[in-house]
């Protein structure tokens, strides 16, 4: 149910007045898909937690979009590779939101190289960010969702996790691991009304896909011969966050076969 749009709160209000609106924390929200997701939740009046790691200025730009569209929220810093950093972020977010909670795990990185050339450092960093970081977020928020009678967790995956890709061994492995993590969490937490789902957003023009976005190549592996629009992807995520009876599923937002 959409909430009435209220006036934009001051920075002080954002920090000191817990909100009883539905609330969502979005990791990796300083740009790209994360910014679009944040904006979409702001439009329906939610409290939006905008996570960032390095680029606070970009996170504040995302937050401005949320506030201008009628939502409320704040920015939250964390290195999701570090469990304690994630715990502090989740604690801070939960204390600012007294209503229903949702989490969108969107943060991720990709570093390309052929498998035989992949350094341990690159492998470890991609796995620590994309897979272990998501694990940290799920584990940290679980107790808060339990206390509030359930909630929704949405993890952003990739077709690469199903199909693999040349030069993407670490990235593909991290995204494949998310499938097992999501389905396991859905089974373990389902009796407590915690829904956990995976969304495949398809090709989107972001910093992550710069230099590899398949521009003007006919999209022959897509039945519709085009990639999905970001507006449709984020609408799917918002819709999924509000569904009560769906969990453990993979939502494919483009027209490729898995």
Image (tube, rainbow, N blue to C red):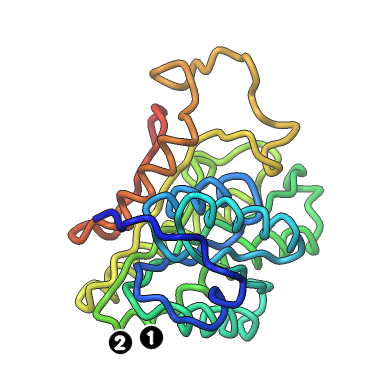
Residue located at (37% from left, 52% from top): 44
Task: Give x and y (percent) for residue 142.
Answer: 39, 80
Residue located at (47% from left, 59% from top): 178
Task: Give x and y (percent) for residue 80.
Answer: 63, 71
Name the one closer to the observer, 30 or 64. Answer: 64
Residue 208 relative to residue 104: left or right: right
Report how far apart the C-alphas of labels 2 and 1 lie in the structure: 6 Å
Which circle, 2 or 1, is nearer the viewer?
A: 2
Name the one closer to the observer, 167 or 156. Answer: 156
Location of the C terminus by quadrant is top left
Q: Does residue 224 lie above or below 100 as drawn? A: above
User: Dividing the picture into quarters, in which one does residue 78 lie?
Assistant: bottom right
Q: Are marks 2 and 1 in contact (CB under 8 Å)?
A: yes
Residue 3 relative to residue 138: left or right: left
Question: Dot 2 lies on which element?
Answer: helix
Location of the N terminus by quadrant is bottom left
Name the one closer to the observer, 97 or 235. Answer: 97
The 10 Å Cα crowd at callout 2, few under 14, some 14 to 19, many 20 or more, is few
Q: Does residue 32 lie above or below 51 as drawn? A: above
Q: Which mark is residue 147?
A: 2
Name the one closer to the observer, 40 or 54. Answer: 40
Q: Does residue 99 lie above or below 22 as drawn? A: below
Residue located at (52% from left, 85% from top): 91
Residue pointed to by mark 1? 143
The 10 Å Cα crowd at callout 1, few under 14, some 14 to 19, many 20 or more, is few
């Amino acid at each position: 149910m959409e909430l009435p749009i209220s006036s934009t709160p001051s920075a002080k209000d954002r920090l000191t007045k817990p909100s009883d609106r539905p609330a969502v924390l979005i990791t990796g929200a300083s740009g790209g898909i994360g910014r679009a997701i944040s904006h979409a939740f702001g439009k329906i009046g939610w409290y939006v937690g905008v996570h960032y790691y390095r680029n606070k200025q970009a996170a504040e730009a995302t937050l401005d979009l949320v506030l201008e569209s009628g939502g409320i929220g704040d920015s939250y810093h964390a290195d999701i590779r570090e469990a304690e950093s994630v715990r502090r972020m989740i604690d801070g977010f939960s204390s600012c939101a007294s209503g229903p909670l949702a989490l969108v795990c969107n943060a991720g990185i990709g570093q390309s190289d052929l498998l035989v050339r992949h350094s341990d450092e690159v492998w470890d960093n991609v796995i620590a960010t994309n897979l272990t970081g998501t694990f940290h977020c799920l584990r940290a928020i679980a107790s808060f969702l339990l206390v509030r009678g359930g909630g929704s967790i949405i993890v952003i995956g990739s077709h690469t996790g199903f199909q693999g890709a040349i030069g993407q061994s670490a990235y593909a492995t991290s995204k494949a691991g998310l499938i097992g993590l999501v389905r396991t969490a859905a089974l373990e937490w389902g009796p407590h009304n915690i829904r956990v789902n995976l969304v495949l957003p398809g090709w989107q023009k972001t910093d992550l896909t710069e230099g590899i976005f398949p521009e003007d190549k006919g999209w022959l592996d897509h039945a519709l011969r085009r990639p999905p629009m970001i507006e449709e992807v984020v609408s799917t995520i918002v819709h999924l966050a509000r569904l009560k009876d769906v969990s453990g599923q993979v939502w494919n937002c483009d027209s490729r076969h898995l």
